[in-house]
Image: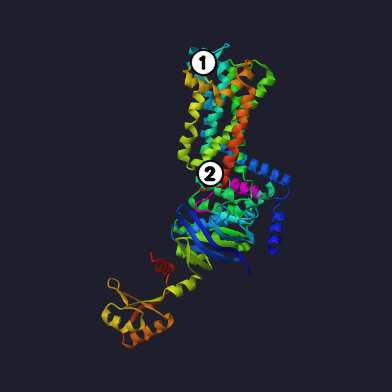
Amino acid sequence: MTDTIVVEDVYKAYGDVNALNGVSLSVREGKIFGLLGPNGAGKTTLVRILTTLLKPDAGRVEVAGIDVLKDSMALRRVIGLAGQYPAVDEQLTGRENLVMVGQLYHFSRSEAKSRAQDLLKRFSLTDAADRPVKTYSGGMRRRLDLAASIVARPKVLFLDEPTTGLDPRTRMEAWEFIRELVRDGATLLLTTQYLEEADALTGFITVIDEGRVIAEGTPDELKSRLGSDVLELRVSRDINLKRVESLLQPIGKDMPQIDLQSGDISIAVNDGTRSLLDAVRILDGEGISIEDIGLRRPTLDDVFLSITGK
Amino acid sequence: MAQEQTFSSVHIGQQSGGSIFERIWWNIHDTLVITRRNLTYYTRLPQLLVFSTIQPVMFLLLFTYVFGGAIQTPGGEYINYLLPGILIQTVMFGGTQTTIGLAEDLSKGLIDRFRSLPMGRAAVLAGRTVADSIRNLFVVILMTSVGYIIGFEFQNGLLNALVAVAVLILFGHAMSWIFATIGMLVKDPETAQVAGFIWVFPLIFASSIFVPTTTMPDALRTFAENQPVSVVANVVRDLTLGTSTGDFWLALVWITTIWLVFAPVAVWQYRRAAS
């Protein structure tokens, strides 16, 4: 396995603002890589550098074995880009958009047409193919934009916040299409502000904030490194919650949290499975009947809040 | 070593790069793809077609019938004086659409997409200006036809008439690069509406397009007689009417200079564009 994207010590400033402050990362071939961070963290700047749209002030950037600064034209032939907003021509039809992009990749007109046809089908746009894009919904535009980014079957694909501005249902749908993008073995770098998105789609995440890498790892690694499991349970209404609290206190990291309204009890624990068994044993031994019990992994949101401190 | 191999296989795989002739061919190819895209707009946006055909014809009729009777021009009918000038006004007003269109492409991220493609660096702007020139040719033919219906006549032979049209189209093409430069600079379509137009008005009205400059106050007259719009208008008028008020070579120098300055500036703006 080789690294498809290598970023070494990259700096970029806009005037006095340092957008990137020495970022280094590498992405394995054929993986989905997530670049996570709040607004203004430098995600888009990095993607623009990787796709030849912007020159870094310092550092080395290599994509698919090509130095971004030395041979940007060769690089453009093997990458695909879908930016934050769908970059499709509103006046052209969906089909015309894809044929145009194909021709600009220097495929013959017939090849560009047949690729457009395939992509329209793959992205469920066949019915709308010959309507101007201005009549498309947000989700359809996004799908067309994703289709346009893979016209040339790129080796490396960059998606900058691909689901920003989509409603939850359309977002889930977009995830399906994004998984589809890497079906042919492309490497994908995806930026997002949504932790659940990084969790759902990516195998490896780098978290950046204020132009610096602040954490990296698989979603599970990040979660287990930075957050603990949470044990959640509910006992029958007539039981004194104070008593349950004192019984369970020894197994938790901190004091159990009790929601007085619902009677839900949650406890942060170190060893999830062990603690679950302990809790059941203790409460059962006291004759307290448990209505519901479960273990919740920390979400990436928990992780994100704890590392960025925001 | 491995890097070099990837590099060359990429070149062969997508049949670009290579010799200077191949690169020129692909630049022309890309320009034509974009030209086609921009011309498609005229079939999709009725307001664009109206703006570029009906509106200039309205100007022609208004100036001929409302102001025409009160304006004294040398050498007979006002329509003969007016038409060559109003063709230049049409070409200039049409160019403002390029400023707006490019600012729109930029703000919607289309320029980013184009810049991430392995296409010629000048093709997006060249395609735009070539589309402008094709539209200009169409509108010039339309307006000349309407002109003929209301009394205009070429007085100086077919060859000179064709040269006049060629000068108009070349001037329009050079101006398109100024409009393109402004579009790349202002970036947002609303500002482009204003920025595309505002500098055009003094050039059009303080000129010899509608009236002879002889009655203007001295300072204004000096400007009006020496600015490129008048220089080109006079030459186009000379070619259509057989007069000799302008300097043909000076007009060509203006056109070439505008082109040589603004085409590189516009392309440079494109290459460093950020939406």
Count up the numbered dots: 2
Q: Residues within 10 Å of mark 1 (few under 14, many from 20)?
A: few
User: Helix, strand or loop at disc 2?
Assistant: helix
Which percent across, then down, holds residue A48? 54, 55
The foreground one among A40 and A248 is: A40
Residue B246 forms part of the magenta stretch: no
- Above or below — where is A110 with respect to B157? below
What amino acid does circle 1 point to? Thr
Inspect the image, locate mark 2, and give the three-letter code of the amino acid beneath it: Asp
The residue to which callout 1 is attached is: B214
**Quarter of the picture holding the C terminus of chain A:** bottom left
Query: Which residue shows up at 51% across the image and 71% down it?
Result: A218
**Residue at image mark 2:** B105
Q: Nearer the viewer, mark 2 or mark 1?
A: 1
Q: Quadrant of residue A295?
A: bottom left
The chain that hosts pointer 1 is B
Q: How are the residues colored?
A: rainbow
Is A111 located above or below residue A168 in the figure?
above
Q: Chain of mark 2?
A: B
Residue drawn where x is 50% and y is 12% of the image: B69
Can residue A160 be seen in the rendering of this structure?
Answer: no
Name the outermost residue toward the top: B76
In the image, the segment drawn in magenta is A83-105
